[in-house]
Each structure stands twice: as structure tokens, then as C-alpha cells.
Image: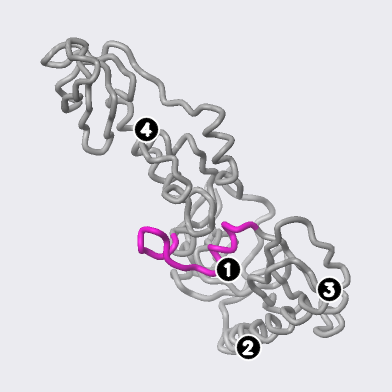
Amino acid sequence: MAEVIGVRFKNVGKVYYFDPDGNQLSKGDMVIVETARGVECGEIAMENREISDEGIVQPLKKLIRVATKEDLKKVAENRAKEKTAFDICLKKIAAHKLEMKLVDVEYTFDNSKILFYFTADGRVDFRELVKDLASVFRTRIELRQIGVRDEAKMLGGLGICGRPFCCSTFLGGFQPVSIKMAKEQGLSLNPVKISGTCGRLMCCLKYEQEAYLDLLRTTPVVNSIVMTPNGKGTVVDSNVLTGILQVHLDSSAPDAAPQSFKVAQVKLLKGGRISLDRKELEELKDLEKD
């Protein structure tokens, strides 16, 4: 076991472990630590606690110091310089006629490096742009191509539900999301209805999936054969949240309307399967990309 603190460097970003070096810290405190890309200022997201050695990436770096007023002033100055750097980079991109969209600019705490985040449809040869920016800022320049999900997380906004993006409010990182999840949750496989503002599958499909899988264990799916109070039939529609099934009875005419039953009223005789055909997968595969 080892005592650690959790430090976050971006809003709703990943939490990294550090050795508190004997300091007792509170959530929200600002601290100075050494990272793989240099000295950085971050916020305490997890107070002192004991973590098993298996959950720690060694070597565990020690806290340098609690951030001082001078440190916080420097952070504020860096934020101001980032806005200027953003405008300069936009002009340089236009001058070099590069097909790329600048998303964000970030100064490291010690000003040893400036990171420019951008999106692009394909690979971009930005070597001349890097040289140009280096001659202006006189420091190390790094350009990072990011995906549309990362762009949405950085910029923020409102989702189709009317609430702020999950990725920019409480999701620390992205998890793989699949078309199968949308199918298992009974959603229409309409790209407009299952994709977020970023154009990829909605993140909520992932963190809601466990609840749906739990309900599916007790809810017959479409094409299941069940015994109802009115006789045997086939499930033609299933709502896992309400627990209501639409069942076409074997004794009914082929064009007769299905009858509604609660899950507790039926007995499963033969289970159906939730599956995607190749055509559906081919049409929606782009939504699964990062």
C-alpha cells in the first residue's frame, strides 16, 4: 500500500497519482508536480488515501509544493498567452494553406513547451508550420492531432438532450461505444438519434449499458417465444424500461394486433437474439470511430 493524491490538469480530465510527500491536501487545492512533459500546475481531485501497489504506475513522483500566489499568477498569465498564441497559429495555418482546424492551445506551466491541438480529415504535413511557430515563440512546439470526441470534450456545448456534454462535465475519459449497445437498448438505429453533437455514438450508451444488460436478463427480447395468460405467442416488441411486451398470440390471425403483457405475466419458452446484420453495421460503422 502507498499513500497517494489524485491530481487533475484539465477540467474533467484524467486523474493522475502522486506522492503527497507528507502533505495533507484537500480537494480543490492547487499543487505543483513534475509530469512526463515537465513541471505542471494541477488541482487536487482526490485527497490523501491508501492505494494498493498494483494500482500505481511506478515510479510514483513526489509533490513539489502546494501552489503559491506567484504560481497561480503564472497560470493566469499562461491562459492569457494561450489566447494570443491561438490567434497567431490561425494566421500561420492560413498562410501555409493547411487543411486543419485549430481547437485549443496549451502552455506548460514552466513555458518549456506550447501544445497546439487540431483536427483534420487525414494526415497533415505541418513541419513548416512548426518551424514557423518556433521562430515566433522561441520555445518547443508540439502539434497534436485529436479526434472529434476530444474536440467536443475540449470545447464543450449542449447535447441533443439539452444538457451540457457528458464528456466535458463528468466523464474523465472515453470508453468504446458500439452499435450493438444501441440495439440492445431498443433505440432506433437512426444516426441522428444515436449520435452526439460530435457525430459519434453518444457516450451515454456506454455508461447506461450495464443497467440495460441487467434488465435484459429478465426481459424477453423480440422473437422470443413466451407463454402468456392468453396462450403461447411471439414477442414482437419489448420495452426493457417499462417491462411491457407486445406479443402476437399463435391463436390470433396473422394480421391481428399484438397484445400487451407485463414481464411478470409471461413465461419464457425460447429466447430470441439481438443481432445486427451486415448492412446495418456497414451503414453505421463511422459512428463507432474515435
Query: For the magenta stretch, what is the residue range?
Result: 147-165
Name the residue beneath numbered marker 1.
9
> Contact, CB < 8 Å: mark 4 with mark 2?
no
The secondary structure type at the circle numbered 4 is: helix
User: Who's the residue at 51% across and 57% down the image?
Assistant: 172
* Residue 178, placed above or below residue 128: above
Res 110 → quadrant: bottom right
* Mark 4 closeness class: few <14, some 14–19, many ≥20 residues within 10 Å: some
Looking at the rendered structure, the secondary structure element under dot 2 is helix
The Cα–Cα distance between marks 4 and 2, rounded to whole angstroms, is 49 Å
Q: Check disc 2 and give the amino acid type.
A: Glu
Residue 166 x, y percent position in the rendering: 44, 59
- Which mark sits nearer the N-terminus, 1 or 2? 1
**Location of mark 2 (residue):** 77
**At x 37% / y 32%, what residue is drawn?**
213
User: Is residue 193 part of the magenta span, yes or no?
Assistant: no
